Image: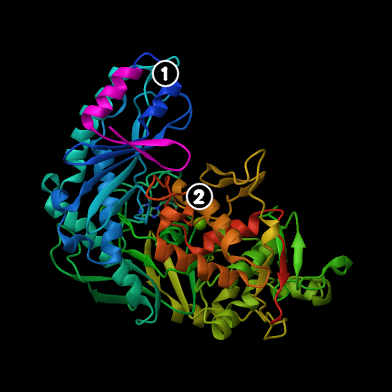
Amino acid sequence: MERTTWGKGKRRAGSLDDLRRVLHRIDGKGYKAYKDLEGGYDFGRFSLHVDHVQGDPFAAPSMLRVRVPMNLAGFPEGLFGNSIRRMALEDFIARRFGAALPSGPDRGPGSGKSGLVSIDAGGQEVLERTACRVTPHWVEVRIYVGLPAAGRRILGRQAERIHCEQLPRTAEKGLFWRNYPRRETEGFVGCVENQEFIRDSLQRLGLVAFVADGSILPRERGNSQQPLAGERAVAFRSAEGLRVSLDLPNPVSTERPETRITGMGIPAGVTLVVGGGYHGKSTLLQALQRGVYPHIPGDGREYTVTCTDAVKIRAEDGRRVEKVDISPFITNLPHGLDTTAFSTDNASGSTSQAANIVEALESGARLLLLDEDTSATNFMVRDVRMQSLVHKDFEPITPFIERVREIHRTLGVSTILVMGGCGDYFEVADRVIMMREYVPEDVTDRAREVARLHATGRRQEAAPGPAWRLDRIPIPESFDPSRGRRSVKIDAKEIDLVLYGRHPIDLRGVEQIVDFSQTRAVGAAVHLAASRFMDGRTPLREVLDRVEAYLDEHGLDHLDPFHRGERHPGSFARPRRHEIAAAANRLRPVRFRIGPGS
Ligand code: ADP
Ligand code: MG
C-alpha cells in the first residue's frame, strides 16, 4: 500500500481491499484508530475519499467524498453545458443521492451518530451548493458519515457494511446516468433554466417580477415551505392588463410540452398591493421575496420570479446600526444625535427600517419589498391629521411615503408595498393591485379616481433630493473571528443565528436566507470578505463585488477558511451579496468609516 503525505497527517491511497483490511484491523479498538482511514480508495467504478474523521461518535460526522469519472457516470453534456444547467444538475444529483441513502432503521446499532449517512441536499429552492460537483471529467458528492461505534469502541464490521456495500449501492443509484429518470432530470434542469431565463428577461420587459398563471403561492402551514395542497389552494391568475407572455428555452414542465408561459408582470416603479385582510397580500409578497431563487418543479412557485436584487425590508427593533446615513428618513433627533452617520446598539422600529433601506441601497438593491405587517407604522405614513397636530419641526421621521417615488426616480430602485390599511399611498403609486380572494386585479385607475374624490390634503413635508450616502468603508480589524484558542471559529447555530468568533449575528430580520447552508456560507463569506477584500479604503459595495467575483471564479468550495486541495469543503449554499452585507451589518463590534466621496 502506498502512503502519501498531505499536510500534517499521513493519507492513504489504496484499494477497496485496503479499506477492508484497515477496518478489520481497527475493529474493536478505540475510536481514535478510525484516523487510519483518512485517504483515498479506488473502488473501480468510483473512488472514495475519507477527508476528515470525527473525534468521537457524538462529534460532527466524518467527511467523505464519492467521485465517479464522467466517462463511467455518463451524464450527457447538454445537462451541464452552461453554469445554470450545471448548478441545476448538481442540485438534482444531491437530491437523488440523498433519496437513495438508507434512512433511519437501516443504519444499524451504535452510539451517537453511528451509521448515519447524509448529504446536504436542498429544499424548495435550487441553490448553488457544495454538496455535489459536476465537471466534464467527473461527478462528485460530498457526504457525511457517522463512523459506527459501541460506546467508544469501533464497530469495524458495521463500518465495512456502510463503506463497502451500502455506499456502492447508493453510488450506483445516485451517480450513474443510466439509473436516472431521463424525463424528470431534463424537466428539472430545463425548469431551472426557464426560471433564470425569465429573471434575465425582466429588465428588458420593464418588469421587476413575474408570477405565472396557475402558480400556487400559499404554503401548507406558517412554518412550512411545502405548497398548500388540494382544493383550498386558489391558483394564481394574472390581473387583466398586467398579463404578459414569454417564450421559454425549454418546455414549461414534463406535463406541459409547450414553451409559452403567461402570467402577471409587475412593472418597475412603485406598486401598491391592497385588499382586505386574509385576501392573500402577504402571501404574494412572501412568494416574491423567495422568488429571487429558482424553485423545484412542483413547488407551486417555480414560475414566481423576482429580479435578483430584490430585498425585503422590515422593521427590526433592537438591531445594531453602524454609521448609516439615515438622514433621508430621520433628522433632528432629540439630543442632537447625528443621523448622517447614525449608530446605535438598539435601533427602534423606524430607525431600523430606515437603516435597512439605506443598507439595501448600498448593497445594490433594485427592488424593495415591504409589508405593512412587518413595518413600523410611523415610518410608513404621517397622515394629514398628524401633520396638523404635531408640527414637522417636532417629528424627526420623514415617512417612506415621501421618499418612495424619489428612490425610483433618482436611484432607479422600484418598490412593491403591501398596504391594506392606508390609502395615502394611492397618490405615490404607479400601479395599484388589489387582491380579492387571492386573485389580483389592476385597480390603478379606480385608486386614482378615489384619490381625486377623497383628497386628503396631506402635504409633502420633506425637502426633495436628499443625498444618499452609500459608501461606508468597513474596517477589517473590527471583524474578529477568533474564539478561545482558535483564530477562526465561525458556526451557524440556527438558520438565523451565526456565532462569529465570540459574537452572535442575529439574522431573524433577514428573511431571504432560505437554507441553513446559506447561513453557514454567510458566516464564512463575511470572514472571506474581511480577511481578503477589506483594506480600510474599499467601500462595502466594492468588497461585495469582489467577494462575488471570487466565488464566481473559484466556486463555493473556497468559502471554508481551512479548505485545502480537493478536500471536502463542508456544506455551503450560495448566499446573495445582500445577505452577506446584512450579516456584516449586524455583527455588533463591526466598525465602518464614511467614505471620502461623501
Ligand atoms: P393578507 O396579507 O391579505 O392579510 P395572507 O396572505 O396572510 O393575507 O393570507 C391569509 C391566509 O390565506 C393565509 O393562511 C394564506 O395561507 C391563505 N392564502 C393565501 N393565498 C391563498 C391562495 N391563493 N389560496 C388559498 N389560500 C391562500
Ligand atoms: Mg398580511
Residue pictured at 45% horizontal, 52% vertical = 514
Q: Nearer the viewer, residue 450 or 350?
A: 350
Q: The N terminus appears in which quarter of the rendering?
A: top left
Q: Which residues are magenta?
A: 1-26
Query: Mark 1 or mark 2, which is nearer to you?
Result: 1
Q: Residues within 10 Å of mark 2 (few under 14, many from 20)?
A: many
In this view, 488 is above or below 376: above
* Residue 392 at x, y percent in the picture: 79, 76
* Residue 377 at x, y percent in the picture: 66, 62
Quote the CA–CA distance across marks 1 and 2: 29 Å
* Residue 206 at x, y percent in the picture: 39, 82
Q: Residues within 10 Å of mark 1 (few under 14, many from 20)?
A: some
Give me the disc on residue 519.
Answer: 2
* Residue 217 at x, y percent in the picture: 36, 56
The residue at the far right in this view is: 335
44 vs 475, left or right, is: left
In this view, 343 is above or below 488: below
Report the amino acid beneath label 2: Thr
Q: Within the magenta stretch, is there residue 248?
A: no
Q: Within the magenta stretch, is there residue 3?
A: yes
